Image: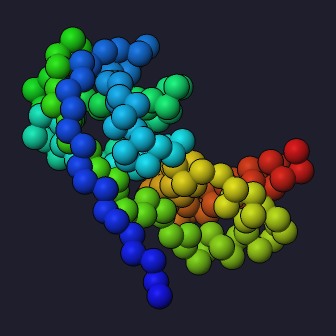
Amino acid sequence: MAARTQARPPKKFEATIYRLGILYCVDVPASVSKSLGGAKYIAVTGTTNGTKMRALLVPRGDGQHRLFLDGKLRKAARAGQGDTVTLVLEPDPESREVPIPDEVLEAFEDEPGALDTFHGLTVAQRRSMLLWTLKAKHAETRAKRIARLVQEMAKRLRG
């Protein structure tokens, strides 16, 4: 008999926006973090002042998380530093993984172990590297970026 997974209900709370260096964020209460799964990083979807968003909760210690709010979201939510916002969050079951194109996989074949090193990175790191590699407008630039990606993974492998 297959185990049934129970969906976690959305969690609603209020928080005040503050700056952390050049970034804007809110603190997520420990009770909300725990109810959303309590993992190190928690993928969520929800709203900020009614504006839809998709984000990643980042650990800040003591079972609490921080949620960074980019300028586009703050503008749409009509909120800034010092403002209290209403947030509704729930776990985001959608994968954030970017598929590895065949041409990248083929390039990794030339460096044994480099692909394993790449898979050892976080989803966010892999996504960032792949998107940078794939957004090249010209085939020559794309090929250079693929080669650089493979070289960087090989370099990390060798330590």
Residue placed farthest to the bottom in the image?
1
In the rendered image, the quadrant that contains the C terminus is top right
* 86 relative position to 131: left or right: left
Residue depicted at 41% across the width and 16% down the height = 20
Whether 63 is drawn above or below 19: the answer is below
Residue placed farthest to the front in the image?
1
Q: Position of residue 71 (x, y in %)?
A: 25, 29
How many numbered dots are placed on residues in this image?
0
* 79 relative position to 2: left or right: left
Give the quarter of the image for residue 70.
Answer: top left
Residue depicted at 84% across the width and 68% down the height = 112
* 139 relative position to 23: left or right: right
Residue depicted at 82% across the width and 65% down the height = 113
Instruction: Give the camera-side residue of 60 and 37.
Output: 37
Give the quarter of the image for residue 110.
Answer: bottom right
Evaluate whether residue 53 shows in this view: no
Give the quarter of the image for residue 12.
Answer: top left
Evaluate whether residue 86 shows in this view: yes
Residue placed farthest to the right in the image?
158
Q: What sort of colour scheme is used for the picture?
A: rainbow
Q: Position of residue 47 (x, y in %)?
A: 18, 43
